[in-house]
Image (cartoon, rainbow, N blue to C red):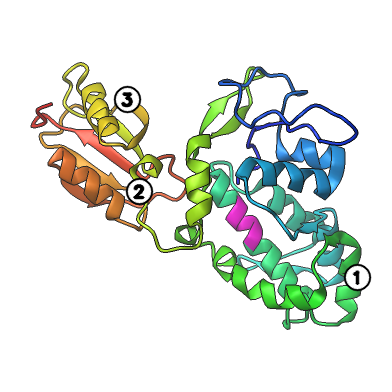
Amino acid sequence: IPGELLLNRRAEQQNGTPAPEQAGEKSEPAGDRNTYFLPANLYAEGGARLLISQISYFLSTPIHYYLGIDYGGIPVMVDYLGGITYRDNILQGNDYYGYFLRGEADEKPLQRALRRMQMLDLLVEAVGEKRGLFSKSRSLRKAAPYLDTNISWREMEEFYPSLSSLFSGNESEVTVLPGTWQRRIDGEYYYKAELGLISYLMTNLGKDFILPRELVTVEVLNGSGLAGIASKAAVILKEHGFHVVNVDNADSFDYARTQVISRQAEMGPAKEVAEIMGAELLKEEVPGFPAMVTVIVGRNFLP
């Protein structure tokens, strides 16, 4: 769930307060921070309890447990451990913390989240003296003030290994909340979720299921130079149920044949698109790319 997710605030049903406003009831954010909130705003206002209540309502899914990490403890713990080796460099507390927050200039939100998970994992290993965060050690007692959770230590010790796919940075193991990036009135970007798809996604989360076409994001690029051809191709894909997120020109108009390019490891969605378009199927993975599939419409395309 992107940290920039814009949430429509649900009112608390206590002491006769109004009934909750339905998430997504307004079609577009009005820029009113009293109505729409980022997760960080909710946490700052009411801590884990309020944030979990709002996310649970938004996903229509109960959230039973949480583990909160105070990032301010990262430089303290790194210095306590004498530094941590990251990418062949020994970093002290402030340097480690600074890179943890900043990352790379062109880093996508998912890449940033997975990198931070990897850096936290390195810290967890060091704090637990290579036996994991939840070993009973002096380091654990040092770290405890920076952790907030309703999970017992025994439960966390069993739960922690299940996060290994996040620590590996493997994006194919992550299900991204369906939605698109948009610009707010104040110029900042926010993430607008596709509310109609959330119920389906949450119902099937963790199962082996065929990704519905509504969740397959596609960009369509004009590589032929013929005016309006990309828009026509986009209409065809929308009629077949795909989620077209971008229509634009390609890098050139010299494409003789239409190409369909998978931007992720899983080729199934791109294969479906290629069959509909009668196009050549290629694979060029791009971590954090805004679409699962790119279609470059060539001169051979006949709408």
Which image quarter holds the C terminus?
top left
- Is the C-beta separation of discs 1 and 2 under 8 Å? no
Q: Can residue 61 be seen in this view?
A: yes
Does 279 sit left or right of 235 as displayed?
A: left
- How many discs mark residues in the rendered view? 3
Q: Can residue 251 be seen in this view?
A: no
Mark 3 to mark 2: distance in Å? 17 Å
- According to the picture, the residue beneath numbered tag 3 turns out to be 248
Amino acid type at mark 1 = Lys
Span of residues in magenta: 113-117
Residue 99: x %, y % from top left: 69, 52
Could you classify mark 2 by the number of other residues whose Cα lies within 10 Å: few (under 14), some (14-19), or many (20 or more)?
many
Query: Residue 263 — which label?
Result: 2
Amino acid type at mark 3 = Asp
Nearer the observer, 269 or 118 = 269
- According to the picture, the residue beneath numbered tag 1 turns out to be 142
Q: Which of marks 1 and 2 is nearer the N terminus?
A: 1
Amino acid type at mark 2 = Arg
Residue 11: x %, y % from top left: 78, 31
Residue drawn at x 79%, y 74% as measured from the top left: 127
Q: Quadrant of residue 95?
A: bottom right
Mark 1 to mark 2: distance in Å? 43 Å
Q: Earlier in the sequence, mark 3 or mark 1?
A: 1
Nearer the observer, 13 or 246 = 13
* Residue placed furthest toward the front: 16
Could you classify mark 1 by the number of other residues whose Cα lies within 10 Å: few (under 14), some (14-19), or many (20 or more)?
some
Does 227 sit left or right of 154 as displayed?
A: left
Residue drawn at x 74%, y 50% as measured from the top left: 98
> Up-down: is 26 above or below 191?
above
